[in-house]
Amino acid sequence: MVAKIVSGKSIRGILNYNENKVASAEAQLLMACGFPRDPDELTFKNKLQRFELLTSQNEKTKTNALHITLNFSNQDTVDDELLQRIALDYMNQIGFGHQPFLVYRHYDAAHPHIHIATVNIEEGGNRIETHNIGKNQSEKARREIEISYGLIKAEDQQKEMAYLLQPVKLERAIYGKSETKAAISAIVREVTGSYKFTSLPELNAALRQFGVLAYPGAEGTLMRQKGGLVYCLLNEEGDTVGIPIKASSIFGSPTLKNLEKKYPLNDSARKPFGLRLKHQLDKAISSSADMAEFQDRLQLQGIRVLLRINADGRPYGITFIDNATRTVFNGSDLGKSYSIKSFMDRLAERSIPLITAPSLGGTKIDVSEKENELKPARDFPAHDQPVIESLWDIAFSDSHEENLPDPFRRKKKKRLQAE
């Protein structure tokens, strides 16, 4: 947990900042400690008057407002109730537990974090000493809270955040350019280790960004019956190419059995990030004038929208990938308004046409007269891919995966007929 304390001269300014975030759906008020009403019953005037009642008792102290932020790792599972408990413990330990304070949860960044607004003037006009509060009381409280709640330590989080908040930098695997096993292994280890997915189709949604597919075998095959899994490279058209790699041969053994152990853990770990994702989707829809702006807003946040298309070319499902938080959600898992029909209806209300791309995009493998000569490749970070794309059933629906060409199925050689 990373804690930051900023002292100021205007509690009104701090309130305005947080309340404007609430008004734009970028934050919500979680707690109102020391206030006579419940949080949802408080007006801006109520909040301001409560603080000004204290600051008016000591007009000599000009720097009388505190704006505190507590930032958590993406690996920390923190729901609203836990954030409230942490905020209470933190404020008690820095000597502000008896002061009125407001706790806001913000959704404008990829990592979970809260903002706390308060003043340092007590009832009666005494000033609470805040000199070196960040270095002393706050650091002590931070360390104890990290241990008590099993949170990622600030030292580790600062290194982690510099990495996690950057767009994904994996290079898209290209058949014929990279040595197959090395290319697949690097991508599979990274994606299975850092993305939060709850099914094989969701894993494939993340993997396909980098030209890789996890394949469990066709229906009725021994491979499917035995719970086998291989990883294949995909070309630009989404077809498997090259030699598939057995899951058990990759470091960490991302087999189907081991992946399934991750599903319930990932389901719990990704929940807090669903709030950020919904907020960013809602914001993009409500504030975009056209498709280009809608695309730009989501792309800046590292979010991709993938449609599941049936054989008739009609969308029947939708999946969201948040590459900033490395989470994958089916629309229905986020709520009714994010299911395929509701989401498209909302776009239609804003006159934003939902255009689907026929492929994942990527470097074309052009074979010239010289065998296997390739044009120069380029990187394919996930945030640079088209935001809205279409994928066929085989990428998302277990019941349709038998349509995927079997990587093990050899093509029969045509016999030459005697003339």
Image: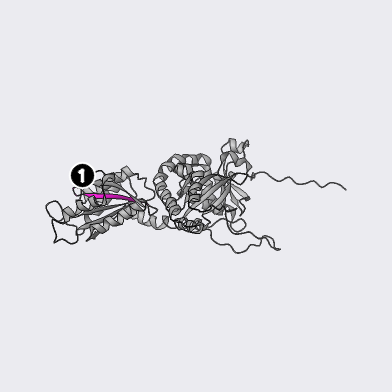
Q: Is residue 100 magenta?
A: yes
Residue 381 shown left or right of residue 97 in the figure: right
Q: Is residue 207 visible?
A: yes
135 up-or-down from 419: above or below: below
- The amino acid type, in three-letter code, at marker 1 is Pro
Residue 185 in percent (x, y) is at 53, 51
- Residue 404 in which image quadrant: top right
Foreground: 263 or 70?
70
Question: What residue sits 33% from the left and 47% below the top?
Answer: 151
Dot 1: element: loop
Q: Residue at x 11, y 52 (%)?
A: 124
Residue sitting nearer the eye, 247 or 356: 356
- Colour option used: one colour
Q: Residue at x 56, y 40 (%)?
A: 398
Toward the left, the furthest residue is: 124
Q: Nearer the viewer, residue 130 or 39?
A: 39
The residue pinned by badge 1 equals 36
Q: Residue furthest right?
A: 419
Q: Which residues are magenta?
A: 98-108
Q: Picture coordinates of residue 343 (x, y %)? A: 49, 47
Q: Residues within 10 Å of mark 1 (few under 14, many from 20)?
A: few
